[in-house]
Image (cartoon, grey):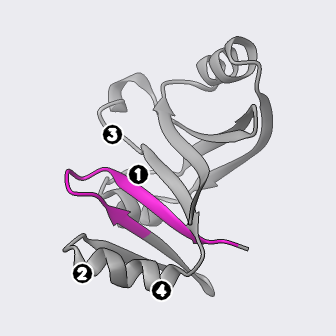
């Protein structure tokens, strides 16, 4: 069983993020964080010189992770869908049997797991629980 956790998209400014996700979609800002440049490179294969700010909005029980980049870097996309599964290890094995690329990225004592579908769409995989 797969469950949607969040959708991650890219936008050009915090102002536009608030205007769209808070005011237009009537969402609520639930947290903010930054993703460091090393992790950006490992996950998205994008080289950046600084941390990327991220705002998380909840809109009708759906979370949107909004990566904030300036206008010149909008070609760099951080778009992905995060899902949770009953057993991450079994899900990784299943993906590999279909020839889908699986990336396991160490982050402290945890591991981040990402897969790509047949045309390169990126999915973050989390353990349900």
Q: Earlier in the sequence, mark 1 or mark 4?
A: 1
Query: Distance of mark 4 from mark 3, alpha carbons?
Result: 30 Å
Dots 1, 4 in contact, CB < 8 A: no
Q: Nearer the viewer, mark 2 or mark 4?
A: 2
Picture coordinates of residue 1 (x, y %)?
56, 66
Query: Distance of mark 1 from mark 2, alpha carbons?
Result: 36 Å
Was residue 123 drawn as part of the magenta stretch in this picture? yes
- Badge 4 element: helix
Residue that carries the numbered disc 3 in the rendered image: 76
Q: Which mark is residue 89?
A: 4
- Badge 3 element: loop
Using the image as rendered, state which of residue 92 and residue 16 is in the foreground: 92
Residue that carries the numbered disc 2 in the rendered image: 97
Picture coordinates of residue 51 (x, y %)?
53, 51
- Badge 1 element: loop
Was residue 77 drawn as part of the magenta stretch in this picture? no
Query: Distance of mark 3 from mark 2, alpha carbons?
Result: 30 Å
Q: Which mark is residue 126?
A: none
């Amino acid at each position: 069983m797969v469950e949607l956790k969040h959708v991650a998209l890219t936008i050009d400014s915090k102002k536009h993020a608030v205007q769209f996700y808070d005011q237009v979609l009537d969402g609520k800002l639930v947290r903010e964080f930054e993703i460091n440049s090393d992790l950006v490179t490992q996950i998205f294969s994008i080289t950046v010189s600084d941390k990327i700010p991220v705002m998380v909005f909840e809109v009708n029980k759906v979370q949107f992770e909004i990566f904030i980049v300036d206008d010149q870097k909008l070609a760099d996309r951080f778009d992905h869908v995060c899902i949770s599964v009953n057993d991450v290890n079994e899900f990784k094995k299943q993906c590999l049997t279909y020839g889908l690329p699986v990336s396991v990225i160490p982050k402290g004592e945890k591991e981040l797991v990402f897969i790509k579908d047949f045309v390169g769409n990126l999915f973050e995989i989390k353990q349900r629980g």
